[in-house]
Amino acid sequence: MPLHLMPTFGAALAAAEAPLTGMWVCTGSPLVAEICAGSGLDLLMIDMEHSPNGLQSVLAQLQAVAAYPITPVVRVPAADVVTIKQVLDLGAQNLLVPLVSSAAEAEAAVEAVRYPPRGRRGVGSALARSARWNRVEGYLADADEHVSLVVQVETVEGVDAAGAIAAVDGVDGVFVGPADLAASMGLLGQQGHPDVVAAVHRTVEAVRAAGKPVGVNAFDPALARSYADAGASFLLLEADVTLLARGSEALVGRLAGS
């Protein structure tokens, strides 16, 4: 019996009437991912760049959240065509590729998620969860419709090229990372510095002018509101690990106060 895949993150962005909200899942735990999936947020960002996530843990988390009305996005550790192929074959439909600083790098990311002749993705759908082992009818012919690509701008060069990056055919959205951007600007650890905030706003404006949605990593509520007001289409507001860290610290604080 033919199976059908979920709508992509790009489709969710196109249908949204207000900015989508989400969080990072970094523990590598499918149980934690499932707990977060039932939160009412719009998206979960499963991180492979700065977290102890490998192929097996990403697969388990995709399976754990599949029953919930939330869109999972996987951030791969780098724009590596082999890793991207493997993550797509796990069944990830939505990818975030970090550290994209030029239109050429964005084009390379697009090629990595597309089959020939449009790209360089290896063909293994009969063996892979992506096509549900060839139970998704016409998967190879319609593969582009089943995959959404967001690229991450997080350097000074990326900010300057944001419009050109967003204009690349096959890029469904741009995500701004203020932490690495601040470091690139010589302001390590100062995501709220006025110069960093201004650079984020310039990126939002350039991407929107190119007709693409743009998201921002913003754990500070005031900054998140300012980016939403500026036209951000999605916001990453927290992470499972930071919620646990701050929550456990607050518990100790309550104990000390009593």
Image: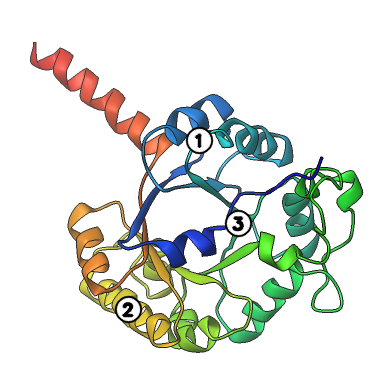
Residue lying at the far left in this picture: please name it.
Answer: 258
* Tag of residue 94: 3
Q: Secondary structure at mark 3?
A: strand
| 13 relative position to 253: left or right | right
Q: Secondary structure at mark 2?
A: helix
Between disc 2 and disc 1, the foreground one is: 1
Neighbour class for label 1 at 10 Å: few (<14), some, many (≥20)? Answer: some
What residue appears at the point 65 percent right and 54 percent down from the top-left corner?
93
Query: What is the three-letter code of the residue carrying label 2?
Result: Ala
- Ranked by sequence position, the earlier of labels 1 and 3 is 1
| 158 relative position to 146: left or right | left
Coordinates of residue 6 in the picture (x, y in percent): 61, 49
Q: Is residue 180 visible?
A: no
What residue appears at the point 46 percent right and 78 percent down from the top-left corner?
212
Q: Is residue 72 above or below residue 241?
A: below
| 128 relative position to 206: left or right | right
Are the two marked residues, 1 and 3, in contact with CB atoms closer than 8 angstroms? no
Q: Is residue 229 visible?
A: yes
Coordinates of residue 76 in the picture (x, y in percent): 64, 55
- Ranked by sequence position, the earlier of labels 2 and 3 is 3
In 3D space, how far apart are the residues under numbered discs 2 and 1 (Cα atoms)?
35 Å
Camera-nearest residue between 189 and 123: 123
Disc 2 marks which residue?
199
Camera-nearest residue between 140 and 168: 140
| 203 relative position to 212: left or right | left
In 3D space, how far apart are the residues under numbered discs 1 and 3 (Cα atoms)?
16 Å
